[in-house]
Image (cartoon, coloured by chain):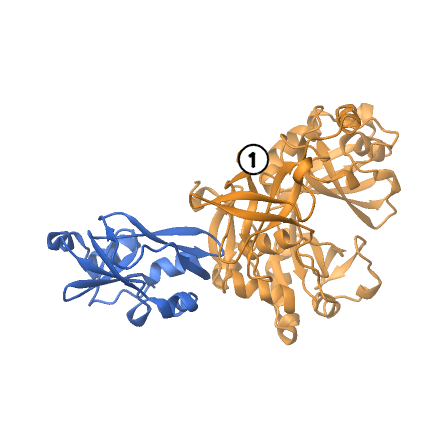
Amino acid sequence: MSNVPSNLQYTGDHEWVLVDGKNILLGITDHAQDQLGDIVYLGDFPQPGESVEQGDVVGVIESVKATSDIFSPITGKIVAVNEDLLEEPAELNGDPYADNWILKIKITVKSELEELLSASAYEQLIED
Amino acid sequence: MASLDDCKKTPFFDIHVAEGGRMVPFAGWAMPVQYAGIMAEHKTVREAVGLFDVSHMGEFLVEGTGAEAFLQRMVTNDVGVLADGQAQYALACTPEGGIVDDLLIYRRAEGRYLICVNAGRLAEDWAWFSGYHDEARDGCTLVNASDDYAQLAIQGRHAQAVVQELTDIDCSGVEYYRFVEGEVAGVRAILARTGYTGEDGFEVFFAAEHAADVWSRVRAAGIPFSLEPIGLGARDTLRLEMKYCLYGNDISTETSPLEARLGWVTKLAKDADFIGKSALLSQKEAGVNRALIGFALPPRAIARHGARVFVEGVQVGVVTSGTISPSLGTGIGLCYLPRTHSKAGSTFEVEVRGKKIQAEVVKTPFYRRPY
């Protein structure tokens, strides 16, 4: 069974979101890391300060098996990339939550947050 | 993609599930893509020993006084050089010289052969072989025995030690591409020193009904050697590090053995007029324009199957196989390049996520075992 922490919100692209004041932290879910398998590389991120639209590709995850895009769930501005994680991308296979966020993005359109899924809705999604 | 429920199951299906295998559809079969993870499994095979279910592969039996002559017509390699107990890699080709399948031929005795074919080509191969076969004319029978056989591969530096625990056959006496028929893990088996990983190892054929028992005996014998089950994911990274072709990716009816650099199993000088021979002779005379090469990418770039390949700005094809090499830690792959650019050290470009990345033709295999 995948770990789906109840304090987070989720997207249909198997990402998690933690709203932290004016910013969000964005990562991938346990289900996503499990499906991807051994993660070997994270990259192709926008520069901090760059604006992104909701649905934009804001990075890529390479596993041994496949390449997978990271999508921005909101319109906003890139604040930071988790540099520590880039050094050790396989950390995501251990625990994809908490300190292993991938991007910090500044919220510009607050209403978009309402489109995120609750933990129970996401659990339902991955069970189907 | 076909759903798992529609797929055929090997006799090890329940065991894979119990072992924690993630089952996926592959060539119409429900197969484990991984257990512990591709990286860990790859390492297990490179550093210890791994156990693969390869029962999805097909087996044809060709038997009779005309069996050798029939096979000489059907495949590119020279079946006539085989001794009893010897195996051979060969190709079946179309009249135009495209590859129908790559396969292994085992000579069990004079006039008795077993052919092992790819799961994904079984239906086409059977139609192909039976379409050219006439029992009365050819003096041999042709039987599709694929459902009767289970097949396991035991691969890695400790493979011989594990298998030796399970048989009275002197395993050290079974040389590369040789096989012995005898008892393994308590059942009648064909024990062949062959594989698809680049490691030392064995492939074992036996009656499907014994599958569960044989698996558990191999698992038990493997404990002191850290043997683990290995899925299709690591099977692919292992074979790719060796530049072993995968049918449907690297070779197909649209590629010729000469382009695929499989001339070493294409015996144009043999007497038999095998299917595709005249086309391949003309090709050889005219010279082929492209060659299947191995390439390496800079750190952090990984090109996958289908990525576009450019030489001097012009698209010349696609990556036929591509991955990160677990042994090297960098992106590797195979593609066809014009012969003018196919020498080791030549550079060209591969499109990775919309960007053209410089790739270098390298000598293959990408990996050589250190023992």
The letter of the blue chain is A
Residue at mark 1: chain: B
- Graded by Cα atoms within 10 Å as few (under 14), some (14 to 19) or many (20 or more), the crowding at tag 1 reads some
Between B217 and B277, the one nearer to me in the picture:
B277
Which residue of the protein is positioned furthest toward the left in this rendering? A111
Secondary structure beneath dot 1 equals strand
Q: Position of residue B234 (x, y in %)?
A: 56, 57
In the picture shown, does residue A83 fall above or below B310?
Answer: below
Question: What residue do we see at 48% from left, 46% from top?
Answer: B25
Write down the residue under mark 1: B317
In the picture shown, does residue A72 fall above or below B111?
Answer: below
Give the quarter of the figure containing the N terminus of chain B.
top left
Q: Position of residue B13 (x, y in %)?
A: 52, 54
Question: What residue do we see at 22% from left, 48% from top?
Answer: A53
Number of numbered discs present? 1
Where residue A87 sits, quadrant-wise, is: bottom left
Can the viewer see residue B200 in this picture? yes
The letter of the orange chain is B
Q: Amino acid at mark 1?
A: Gly
Can the viewer see residue B229 in this picture? no
Give the quarter of the figure containing the C terminus of chain B.
bottom right
Q: Position of residue A14 (x, y in %)?
A: 30, 55
Q: Position of residue B336 (x, y in %)?
A: 62, 38
Which residue of the protein is positioned furthest toward the bottom in this rendering? B224
Question: What residue do we see at 62% from left, 34% from top?
Answer: B252
